[in-house]
Image (tube, grey):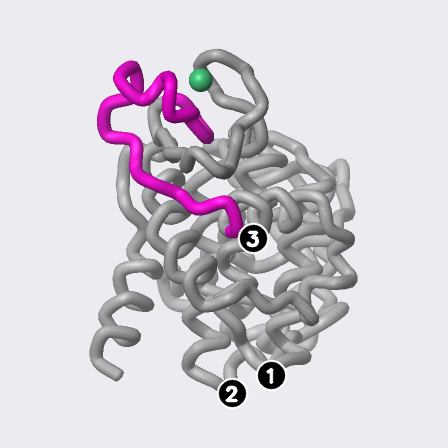
Amino acid sequence: MYLRKTDAVVIQCADYGESDIIVTLYTHDFGKIRGIAKGAKRSKRRFVNNLQPFSYIRVIFSEARGGLIRIDQADIIHPFFRIGENIFKILYGSYFLELVKEMTGERESNPQLFGLLAAFLAVLNDSIPREEYLRIFELRILDLLGYRPRLMECTICSQKVSFGEGALFSYRHGGVVCKGCQVKARGAVPICAATLKAMQMAMEMDLGEVEGVRFPSEVLSESSQILPRFIQYQLGKGLKSLRVLEEIKDGL
Ligand SMILES: [Zn+2]
C-alpha cells in the first residue's frame, strides 16, 4: 500500500460507527481531503486526541474507497490548545476553518492557503482575539482563491479612484466603483477612503505583522459590513460560524 505524508489542519471530525472517526483536513500538499481514521477512538497510541479541530498535525495516509483517505497515523505539531480557552478564539477560529472548507474544492492543492490558515491559527492561539483578524483573513483568502477585490481603481472604467469624490463598493463587480460609474453598479454601497486603504494594506502586509494591526472603529465597522457580504456573494450562501458570531456579538 502506497503511503503519503503531509502536514494538515483538522477542519472537522465526527464519530463514525463504534470506533472510527471521519475527518476533514486541509493539507499542505493535497488541499482539502476527507478521511477515515480506523479504530481512532480505541487507539490512543496512534491518534490520542490529535484529530480535533484546529490541530496542526502531520498525517500518514493511503487512498481508500470513495475518494476518502485512510489515516494511518497523525502526529501533533501544534495543538493550538489555547484557542479552546476563549469563546471568541473558538468562534474566530471556527470561521477560518469554515471559510477554508466552503471556499475550496477537494484535492485542490494550495500551499499558500495552508500557510495562511496555519499562520492565523497561531496568531489566534497566541494573542487576544481581535476582529481585525477576521477581516484580514477574509481579504487574504479571497486573494489566494482568485477573488482579490480591486480597491484602488474603478472596476468599471479602470480609472484610479479619487477618494475626495467618494466611492462605492460593488459586490457584483468585485471592488470599488467611482462616482462616474455609479449608475452602472446597482446595489453598490458607499465605502470610505480609510476603509479602502486599510483593506488594501491588509492584502499586502507581511503575515508576521497581523497581530499588531488596529483599524479605526469606523473602518472596522464598514469592513465588517462589506467583506462578509462579499464572501457570501461569491459563495452564494451564508456561513454558519459567522451567524453564530453575530448573534453572540449582538447579545453582548
Ligand atoms: Zn469608473
In the rendered image, the vertical position of residue 217 relative to residue 7, given as above or below:
below
How far apart marks 2 and 1 lie (CA) works out to 5 Å
The reply to whether the C-beta atoms of the residues labelled 2 and 1 are less than 8 Å apart is: yes
Q: Secondary structure at mark 1?
A: helix
Height in image: 58 above or below 142?
A: below
Find residue 18 and report its image quarter: bottom left
Q: Position of residue 112 (x, y in %)?
A: 72, 41
* Residue 60 in view in this figure: no
- Going from N to C along the chain, the mark reached first, 3 or 2, is 2
* Residue appearing at x 33%, y 52% in the figure: 225
Q: Nearer the viewer, residue 117 or 190?
A: 190
**Residue numbers of the magenta segment:** 173-194
Q: Which residue is mark 1?
A: 82
Which quadrant of the figure contains the N terminus? top right
Residue bearing mark 2: 85
Q: CA distance from mark 3 to mark 2?
A: 21 Å
Farthest bottom residue in view: 85
- SS class, disc 2: helix
